[in-house]
Image (spheres, helix red, strand yellow):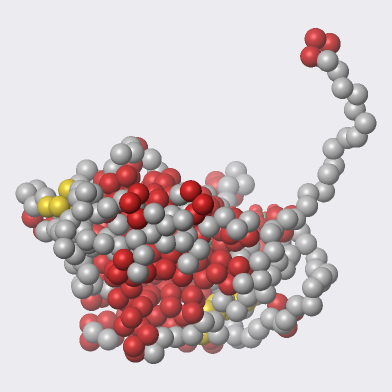
Amino acid sequence: MHKNTKEITKIVLRAAAKARKETSAEPEPKLTQSVNWPIECVVGPGLEGAIACESKIGYVNGSKGWLVYRGYDVFDLCANSTYEEVSYLLLHGQLPDASQLKEYKRALVQCRNVPGTLRLLLNFPVENMHPMAALRLGINLMRQEFTYEDQLDHKPDSTSSINTDEDAIAMETVPQGENHAVYEFSEKKFKSKSDLTGNELESAASLNSCYRLISGTASIAAAINRIRQKHFPIEANLKLSHAANLIYMMTGKIPTPEEERIMDIALILHADHGMNASTFAAMVVASTLSDIYFSVGSGIAALSGPLHGGANEQVIHMLREIGDVENVKSWLKKSLENKKKIAGFGHRVYKAYDPRARILSPLAEYLAKGNKEMLPLFKTAQCLEKEVVSTIGKKKNIFPNVDYYSGLVYHSLGMPSEMFTPIFTVSRVSGWTARVMEYLQKNRIFRPRAMYVGPFNKQYVSLEKRK
Ligand code: ACO
């Protein structure tokens, strides 16, 4: 680990120590045992309390504020690992050894450039779409670039693949001089898609597709950001880590080791979170034996909502609306009187402090120090947290969730607010793909029922006689 990032590790360790002092990390017996189907459970609206499957991928103890990926406490992963290690862990079930990690990183790097996808994406009015809509579209186009799913009988036909040689698009390879430096994809580097798979096109149900999605989602999100800013997309830097390359492709700047480490931790923290709405959406689609690109597309659609991943974008608008620490009390009083939900607070599962917010808060503070724009926003956020927790928080078990401080972190790293949810997506694609692959091993199509509460025996009235 770079010596400048030691301070960041200390911040994580301090947050972990505080959490461990305040609450215990223990599994709930009822939610951590093997299931003998069928089982009885108490189910609330929105399937609250329903157990839909077994999983070894991750566990959330909402009453203790404890988050586990494949048996590892997320605090330990944030302090010691990287996003590449964590996404491998989620997908493969164990941390990689040195050679597995090297090979995995090589595979991800090889999937970084998605020229055919970007060529198709540039035909759409990306700058007028919400980035989550554009990202969802981009994932569909990736499916077109890399899989043979839409070909007759699902048979690979290399002649109809999108060839990167014919596919050169204008990109910036030297963004520091971006006013002049417009280049095309280097033919040699991206000549064939065969390096990863041995095939020109591949099945959309393979592990390779997961790698492509984990790597490619970052590149598409970054390209969307660039297009929105009226720049060309930036060619991936194959030497950088996933986190550093994401910042580079988004902003054109190679991040400092501290910035890279903080983005890496933010990606780790967002990688998986049980059967949340977007993961569930992805799994429902997969359970029909559709494919993993469609699953991820559905996850993106679900994550975009303001009650889910879209809340991080709302938070920064809210903090700007409040304007200053002095206005916090009156703003909150008015919001609560109007029965408004405060963005970035509350959670369906956590009824304790969200462990992810415990880490993101001091990281946001670290980045905000000395930043004229961000420091007042951070102070406002901190003050609002204190007020919410001391008014409704303790009564209703409402604390900051992951979305409360993440936007402040991303914004300090140079990301515009409308890209916060896409960056969340870049990370969560690991959890979606891991859970989909796991579920497919014992697939059963999802099919809950609704309680019909409408009438029966109504007499059909012809159109002319209807009032
Ligand atoms: N602000 C004010 N009051 C709240 C908030 C909030 N953010 N969240 C919950 N409450 C109140 C509710 O009004 C309700 O009060 P009542 O019992 O007096 O009616 C009580 O707390 C319980 O809330 P529910 O709505 O039942 O909580 P639920 O589990 O259904 O919803 C949710 C969770 C959707 C996240 C909710 O807390 C919310 O809307 N938060 C704001 C949006 C947000 O931050 N979403 C991101 C969540 S994290 C993620 O998805 C990545």
Q: Nearer the viewer, residue 297 or 403?
A: 297
Residue 352: image quadrant is bottom right
Residue 212 is situated, as x and y percent measured from the top left of the image, at 38, 64
Q: Tell me the residue at 48%/48% (across/down).
A: 152
- In the displayed structure, 371 sits above or below 39; it is above
Residue 135 is situated, as x and y percent measured from the top left of the image, at 40, 50
Q: Quadrant of ligand 1?
A: bottom right
Q: Quadrant of the C terminus?
A: top right
In the rendered structure, the answer to whether residue 110 lies left or right of residue 256 reads right
Q: Tell me the residue at 15%/52% (across/down).
A: 184
- In the displayed structure, 467 sits above or below 49; it is above
In the rendered structure, the answer to whether residue 165 lies left or right of residue 41 reads left
Q: Tell me the residue at 60%/86% (across/down).
A: 24
Q: Nearer the viewer, residue 30 or 306?
A: 30
Q: Quadrant of the N terminus?
A: bottom left
In the rendered image, the residue lying farthest to the top is: 464
- In the displayed structure, 8 sits above or below 110; it is below
Q: Nearer the viewer, residue 190 or 108?
A: 190
Residue 188: image quadrant is bottom left
Q: Is residue 116 visible?
A: yes
In the rendered structure, the answer to whether residue 296 lies left or right of residue 161 reads right
Residue 219 is situated, as x and y percent measured from the top left of the image, at 31, 59
Residue 47 is situated, as x and y percent measured from the top left of the image, at 72, 59
